[in-house]
Amino acid sequence: MYLAGGNLLCALRWEFWVGIRLSRSGLTGPAACLDLAVVFAASFELETTGFSDVQDITDAVRQAVERSGITTGVVCVANPGSTAGITTIEFEPGAVADLKAALERLAPERARYAHDDTWGDGNGFAHLRSALVGASRNFPVRNHAPVLGTWQQVVFIDFDNRPRRRRLEIVVVGE
């Protein structure tokens, strides 16, 4: 399946797991009751330009939650990498420019980093920005949708110092 949304083109891979938990209730005696917890996983890839490239991934998160069939639970969006981050923002040019400027003040691209001295790859700033923003975010799920504010979008930010092809993971757990 391919999604086109602005500059986001994703190839989605869907996987289902159903976990079964057997529990006993002391109030009703030794009779066991069966509870089902559904775990749904999806991954998608996107192309980035690096250097704090901010991409709106809200539609991909919403589609994964809808596809999961889960009504109530939690969705985790994760970046398996150390030079990118996931956060929320009102995805409009002014707020995005402000976020980029704030990150540049916190971890300037042209500053000297011990990481660069060790590895010589020049992306020490990207590792720090990723650590500050975080590589994953969790959101409640209600009525088959992530619970987000009116002006809140989920964004992926690639801080690395070169274009990349990134894979993101989405896991939805609930009932």
Image (spheres, rainbow, N blue to C red):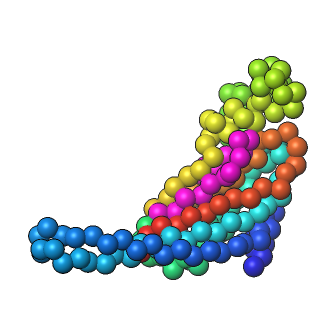
Location of residue 135 with respect to 73 vertically, above or below:
above
Instruction: Looking at the picture, tell me which residue is in the foreground, 76 or 110.
Output: 76
How far across and how far down the image is residue 89, in percent?
61, 51
Up the image or down, 96 lies above or below 9; here it is above
The location of residue 46, given as percent across then percent down, is 79, 61
At x 50%, y 58%, the residue is: 139
Q: Quadrant of the C terminus?
A: bottom left
Which of the 4 image quarters holds residue 36? bottom left
Residue at the spot x=64%, y=36% of the render? 131
31 or 112, which is in the foreground?
31
| 84 falls in the magenta region | yes
Given the current orientation, which residue lies at the most extreme front position?
Answer: 30
Residue drawn at x 50%, y 70% as measured from the top left: 39
Residue 63 figure quarter: bottom right
Above or below, comparing residue 163 to residue 170 in the picture: above
User: What are the residue bounds of the magenta stretch?
Assistant: 74-92
State whether residue 144 appears in this view: no
Where does residue 47 sit, x and y in percent of width and height? Answer: 83, 58
Tell me where residue 26 sits by quadrant.
bottom left
Locate the N terminus and report the quarter of the image it occupies: bottom right
